[in-house]
Amino acid sequence: MKFTNMFMPTTKETPSDATLPSHQFLVRGGFISQSGAGLYDFMPLGKIVLDKIRAIVKEEMDNAGANEMLCSFVTPQSFWDESGRSSTMGNELLRFKDRKNAEYVLSPTNEESVVNMVKNRITSYKNLPVNLYHINLKFRDEARPRFGLMRGREFLMKDAYSFHSSQEDLVREFNLMEETYKRVYQRLGLEFRVVEADSGAIGGSGSKEFHVLANSGEDTIVVCPDCEYGANIEAAVRKKRHFDAWFENTNTPASMEKVLTEDLKTIEEVSNFLSVSKAQNIKAVMKKAIYDEDSKPVIFFVRGDDELEETKACNAVDALDLVDITEDELKDAGLTPGYCGPFNLPQGTIFVIDSELENEIGLACGANEEHYHFVNTDLSLVKDAVYKDLITVQEGDSCTCCGGKLEYTKGIEAGHIFQLGTKYSEAMDAKFLDENGKAQPFIMGCYGIGVSRLVAAVIEQNHDEKGCIWTKETAPFMVDVIVSNAKKEDELNAGLKIYEELKSNGISTIIDDRTKERFGFKMGDFELIGFPYAVVVGKKLQDGLVEIVDRRDTGSKIEIAIDEVATKLKELI
Amino acid sequence: MKFTNMFMPTTKETPSDATLPSHQFLVRGGFISQSGAGLYDFMPLGKIVLDKIRAIVKEEMDNAGANEMLCSFVTPQSFWDESGRSSTMGNELLRFKDRKNAEYVLSPTNEESVVNMVKNRITSYKNLPVNLYHINLKFRDEARPRFGLMRGREFLMKDAYSFHSSQEDLVREFNLMEETYKRVYQRLGLEFRVVEADSGAIGGSGSKEFHVLANSGEDTIVVCPDCEYGANIEAAVRKKRHFDAWFENTNTPASMEKVLTEDLKTIEEVSNFLSVSKAQNIKAVMKKAIYDEDSKPVIFFVRGDDELEETKACNAVDALDLVDITEDELKDAGLTPGYCGPFNLPQGTIFVIDSELENEIGLACGANEEHYHFVNTDLSLVKDAVYKDLITVQEGDSCTCCGGKLEYTKGIEAGHIFQLGTKYSEAMDAKFLDENGKAQPFIMGCYGIGVSRLVAAVIEQNHDEKGCIWTKETAPFMVDVIVSNAKKEDELNAGLKIYEELKSNGISTIIDDRTKERFGFKMGDFELIGFPYAVVVGKKLQDGLVEIVDRRDTGSKIEIAIDEVATKLKELI
């Protein structure tokens, strides 16, 4: 390809809302162009990168035996009513009516479509398993689209859906997909981590995320430096901590007692007053849980030194969302803000206690009475107690696998695999006959890769202050032959000769043959666009020499004889 | 690929609404699956065919120097307001609001998006021309989606947009695209015709359509058997016909005269009464023209033996649509149904006269007065007359190029190229600086191929009563190795050996290795799916023989020695 034959408009202007390097450099490098809020066009260079990533994903999926298909992007809302997600997906699910007032959805994912495709077409266990995938547009009506391709509304996703006759076979495919995904990210040249994850709106039991490590990542990942453990903070677990049951530093009574704690509301104040540690106190976090048709006050009890993890909390009460609750709303529900504890709550109050507190004794907590706390409690006496993991794992907490000290890192979610089970097949009555001739719902898995997001993730992990630095498998072209002054016939001819030679050696090459641009400008474009290598044809041409610049090695240069360029580049690549 | 590793559910059931062979066989052969009105999923076999067609289109576009990009499918309605198409595209343009009540459109085509992409990025004639294309989903909210992939609402289209600094350069690219398109259809193995076309809602001046010839085509094409002339009936022209100016068979007066024609309203009745031919009469066709914000009665005058061509008529009065008008509406407008003519019309009446009648003399027409006609008229005397081509060319009319007798044929529109000119660049203020430093609107062309429609078009042209017959370039697999009884180890092994050998010879091959299906069923699937060739491994295996079946040659069979199969197939292919 020649610069003069390609529309690749670079610019010095950074969009005002572009905070991430990938957003800035992909726009400035002429890869993408914004068409609306969360909507991007791929210009020719961006399209090449997108296609390279897409091709690797396809190849690895095909190698794993999956079948490519293509679901319609517009789907009838009836599919979503059948699965129940019309109501659970909230405003991210974009709905619209056609000219006949029939209701449709812009697919944000396609579980329903694929169940519909397979239903009544696979009727026997003999035709299972099958794994169907497509690489297609998706739309999620994000409340706050931002970060360029990272959190757009329209995006390209590879989503696969597998169907099985047994849980064991699902696990086999799930593991195969994990290996397949690892190969994809490895081939893309990315540093990544596979972590335990929350299943979110997709549902199901086990799920894993694939994170591209980058400082700008929106997700906090908890990793163990001593073993393989890694989890999204939304799903991370830690070793149960131990605290002395009886206060060593106070002369506490032998059983639960109510203590006047006038005007002391915070954990800090109460702990100081009772001379106990924050961990020996129970903290009440009060929220309003949003359900399909109503909302209710909910209380989460965690150790005084822990923080509530909202995704875990939301899952614990099966809510669509958790929002802040006002003091008036709490009082209307008969609750006592500042003095709330798990004992003697008004009847019907929804509350969950963090698992670490199960059957703990000797802790302090609010007495559900203005100005009073209980001390020396026994949580096994709480009526109808529900215990669930609710807390945010903190750096320094211990790994459940090996006891190592957990650390935080930042990641970009670039893939997610789920063991769905029968959630969708049951809801949509999609069944097969098992070996005994009995109708059973399909056991399903689903597997997603954010293809367009990966374009940005590569740059988040690989850039410097000058621009993009593409990995070998993602570079739009591997080599940029820069003709310093293309008005000079000998330079242009030498450049074209090298260009043809590299191409005939199978090296994807572009030549900067623009006559009106100066060398500095061309070099700037090379650095901004981020081709892995440049061959600079300039003044030393009279000595038969050109320069090879390695963009990935902070622009290091080698002088080399013209006829050794191809050999040297093949060696480098 | 093996049948046992692929989801390819064939069925004997034909969808109740499937009238076209392509619709029936693509569903029955497991290529596509309907997900909603005008919405189709491609199952794995269908996806392979779609990708093959897509790849050929991409290759030819790239060879022609076009740059692939990708516009967002969802576009802001503001684009469409700017170009003016929000109002002119009517209900086919699907609009919706997002969660913030902002207005968007599901793109039916992308002129606006691409102008937006190029605007301010190409600022000088030095960076022209450029041709940008993408292969992306489109959505048109058809009033009556039907015929499977032929007239769906969501479909895959290749659309290209070129930008030029001169009309000559546009014509050069337009011709290049015509040649490129011809190569695409030739490579796909299709019989097609390039014809003159109406530009429709896209606009612009010159346009050509590419029609795949098939009896089931929705479009009537007028072709000349003696020369290259071809046109969509909406745009077809014929040689001007000649009729004697003075009635030979009546004793007519020397100048226009009003004649009592009591209760004679039709052309037939009036012609008989006046003893003139229908062609010597003027027929008034009255319609209601729909405009953006209102509607008006319009009258079209054509020869009594001609029929009005509605697309031409609609264009002639710049209307969005033409609909029937009631007698009351005509009377309200001061018109006299049955007695309407071009003389003495109420002031302000919109009317157009067919070009063939320009300055004709001696014709009869309505007198705009109940029960009266004029005879012996002189059309050059009609005030404010507008003459335009309004008529439907009929079989037997003469070719304007060579005088040959024009014929009708049926075609499926599979491509359309337009010389747009400055329609969009002017509306959207997209300009470049010309050689004199003066700002000029881009001169544009646009070029579309219906990629998913071509999947159906191939089958409309290539099928028999048993099923699909794919052309070599579109076949999902070239050869189907049918193992008659895959439970017999020797047959299965021989089949697998042939399968591997064909693959290693670069022949795309699938093996029907299903153990529970009988030979007849497998043969039925071969015929329904329509692979070009089958290799049947059956009883003659003990003699070292297998059969090659040619699906395209009505299933002709050759017996051949196993070790000659690959050589023979390479020869056939």
Image (cartoon, coloured by chain):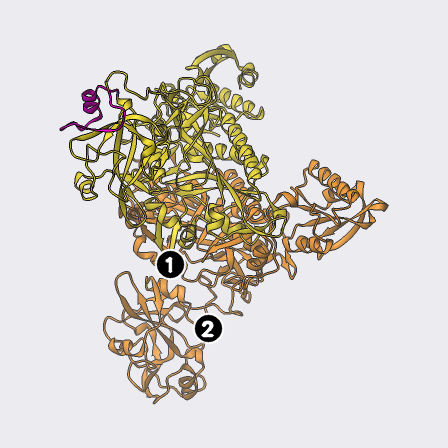
Chain colours: A yellow, B orange
Q: Is residue A269 magenta?
A: yes
> Which mark, residue A102?
1
Name the quadrant containing residue A354: top left
Q: Are the residues flagged by discs 1 and 2 in contact, CB closer than 8 Å?
A: no
Residue position for label 2: B242
Look at the image and give the residue range highlighted in magenta.
A252-277
Q: Residue furthest front?
A: A254
| Left or right of B28 in this view: A240 | left
Where is residue A351 drawn, in percent x and y? 30, 38
Above or below, B570 against A102 in this view is above
Q: Nearer the viewer, residue A24 or A563?
A: A24
Q: Nearer the viewer, residue B92 or B128?
A: B92
Above or below, B410 against B497 in this view is below
Where is residue B9 drawn, in percent x and y? 60, 52
Disc 2 residue type?
His
Residue drawn at 46 percent across, 71 percent down: B241
